[in-house]
Amino acid sequence: MKYLTYCDNHTSAGLNHQLSNIKTLIREAYALGRVPILPMLKLSSMHNCGREIYTDLSSYIDWKNSHVIYDCGRKEPLRYKKGNSLLYYFPQSSCKVSDLEHSWSENENDKYDLLIKKVSEIQSRKYTGLWQRGRLHPNHERVQSIILLLWQINAPTTQHKQSLDV
């Protein structure tokens, strides 16, 4: 199995912004025929009641029921791996680290098991965390859309609402 992930230790942004970043990762991974590794993202304290948190968005997204839709109309369940801890299992010789501007060649895609796009602090400021402004693989357009099913976080149940009204 071959994988793709983005490594970004600098960008702190809101939920919608980081969701766009994840969609970009998924779109590029599918264009390359790879499985995306969902990284830990930093949600900004500006958007989160003064608390900065690190998350793979699994508190917000039901990854198991998410789908990818291709331009031909074919729909398939999202294949993914969670967590950057998976990165430690790859020998250095099977990994290729490049910057956000890099577009993978067919040779690189065939040769390496793990491709990593590393976002520098300068790029983070330049792109304000929008990974989609980096250079994507030319086939990324074949992924028409990504359906991510959002969970209702801490939504009170009907029974709970009634107890609040009393």
Image: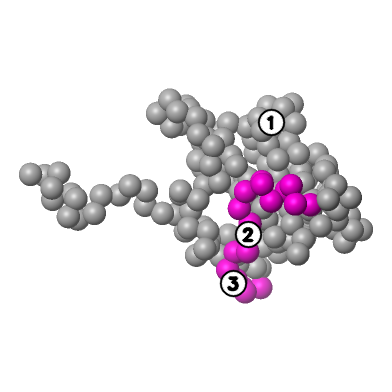
| Apparent side of residue 128 relative to residue 49 in the rendered image (left or right) | right
Q: What is the crowding at mark 2: few (fewer than 14 residues within 10 Å), some, or many (at least 20)?
A: some
Instruction: Identify the image quadrant of the C terminus.
Output: top left
Say what secondary structure mark 1 lies in: helix
Which corner quadrant holds the N terminus?
Answer: bottom right
Circle number at residue 65: none
Say whether disc 1 or disc 3 marks the residue closer to the N-terminus: 3
Q: Is residue 120 left or right of residue 61?
A: right
Marks 2/1: CA–CA distance: 24 Å
Q: Point out which mark residue 75 bears.
A: 3
Q: Is residue 122 above or below residue 97?
A: above
Q: Which mark is residue 124?
A: 1
Name the residue nearer the viewer: 60 or 144: 60
- Spot occupied by residue 42 in the image (x, y as percentages of width and height): 56, 35
Residue type at the position of mark 1: Ser
Q: Is residue 69 visible?
A: yes
* Residue drawn at 81 percent across, 57 percent down: 113
Residue 83 in the image: state x and y as whole percent. Answer: 62, 48
Determine the image quadrant of residue 81: bottom right
Q: What residue is shown at x 85% (from left), y 47% (from top)?
A: 92
- Mark 2 vs 1, N-terminal side: 2
In magenta, the rendered stretch is 72-90
Of 88 and 135, the residue lying toward us: 88
Residue 133 at least partly seen: no
Judged left or right of residue 19, residue 34 is right
Question: Disc 2 vs disc 1: Cβ atoms closer than 8 Å?
Answer: no
Mark whose residue sits in front, 2 or 1? 2
**For mark 2, what is the residue?**
80
As measured in the structure, the alpha-carbon distance from the residue carrying label 1 to the one carrying label 3 is 33 Å
Numbered disc total: 3
Please name whichever residue, 160 or 134, is drawn nearer the observer in this view of the structure: 160
- From this view, report whether residue 49 is shown above or below residue 27: above
